[in-house]
Image (cartoon, rainbow, N blue to C red):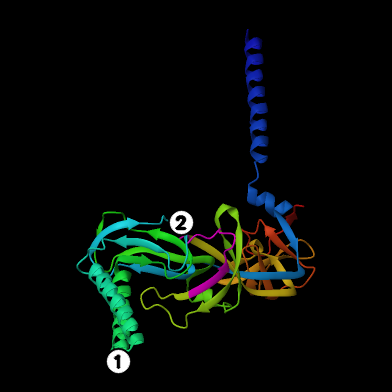
Amino acid sequence: MKRRLIYIVLAVLLVALVGNRVWRSSKRVETKSISQLQAEKGVPVSIHTVSRGEITEFVELSGTVHGIAQSDLISRITERVERVQVHAGEKVEKGQVLVVFDTGSPMAQYRQAKAALGDAERNSSRMKALFEKGAVSKQMLEQAESGLEIARANFEAASSLVRITSPITGVVTSLNVYEDEVVSVGSVLCTVARVDSVKIVASAGQTELRGLERGNQVSIAASQGARVSGRVSSISSSADPQTRTFRVEIVADNSSGYLKPGAFVTGKIRTAHEENTVVIPLTCISSHEVKPTVFVVTENDYAELRPVRIGITNERSAEILDGLREGEHVILRGHELLAGGEKLKIIE
């Protein structure tokens, strides 16, 4: 019995001893941290080989489309609209009647002027016939003809108040009046614009003016996914006192009709271009103490933090004026947590 008890105690001690050794062994094989693994095997990064190429810098400006020539037709009387003879979007010719007011308007005195013109025409004809017969003097004939010219001018003035005509050939871009509506003096009845060419009025901040000049080529995003070419036609020399921005005008051919008056569009303007210069992806560049820097891969695959001087840039690339040589390798991805001096693991 005692011997059996001894065997049991020895078995328990043996199990405890083996368990303790296994536990100690597991404590020694601890899971290594990511930083430890990176220190041993290197921080995984992808790289870019520095090379020469070309780069173009752009600035984007947004603005409103206007007809290259545009006219607001404004009422000069307070009166009821008798007829509206056009629709928005309709093409019209210069001199075409678009809106007609009540011709009985006392304010316009259209009917009185028309009657006076008729009287003057009849009087002029009568005087001419009498003059040919020698019944009246040349002076009386000239007075009659002068009266006719005055009556005609008065009628045209009265007519222009009640018969609103287009001053240009173009398109009715907006129509703000309806038949039987009473409009007041100063109301904009409609707008007519020439839209075979258009003008885009945009605003630029101080930084956007860098490299911007008259004649710059512009690529404009138009309707239906199309792009229309234009050019910068004017740049204001002084800022708007309220917005602190500068007015920039862009002209573009619109024979396609893709640019609609009143639409808000964005133009991409080429402001600079360099060839045979050191160019790297923009994602290679980070900031250290507010200065642009890159991480260069050393010969033994360590990260070297290096300041660079940047030239022109665009949404993808940057020109490097100083700090890099052709053929060097810079870190493209994976540099976010680097400080310099880390061992690297290059991932193809």
Residue positioned 46% across, 75% down in the render: 247
Q: Magenta residues?
A: 248-263
16 is within the stretch colored magenta: no
Toward the viewer: 41 or 255? 255
Residue positioned 50% across, 73% down in the render: 249
- Residue 89 got which mark? 2
> Label 2 vs label 1: CA separation?
56 Å
Q: Amino acid at mark 1?
A: Ser
- Residue 88 got which mark? none
Principal SS element in the magenta part?
loop
In this picture, residue 131 sits left or right of residue 340: left
249 is within the stretch colored magenta: yes
- Residue 137 got which mark? 1
Q: Amino acid at mark 2?
A: Gly
> From this viewpoint, is residue 181 visible?
yes
* Percent of width and height locating residue 181: 26, 56
* Percent of width and height locating residue 88: 42, 56
Near mark 1 (Cα within 10 A), the count class, few <14, some 14-19 or many ≥20, is: few
Toward the viewer: 206 or 297? 206
Q: Earlier in the sequence, mark 2 or mark 1?
A: 2
> From this viewpoint, is residue 63 visible?
no
In the displayed structure, 264 sits above or below 70; it is above
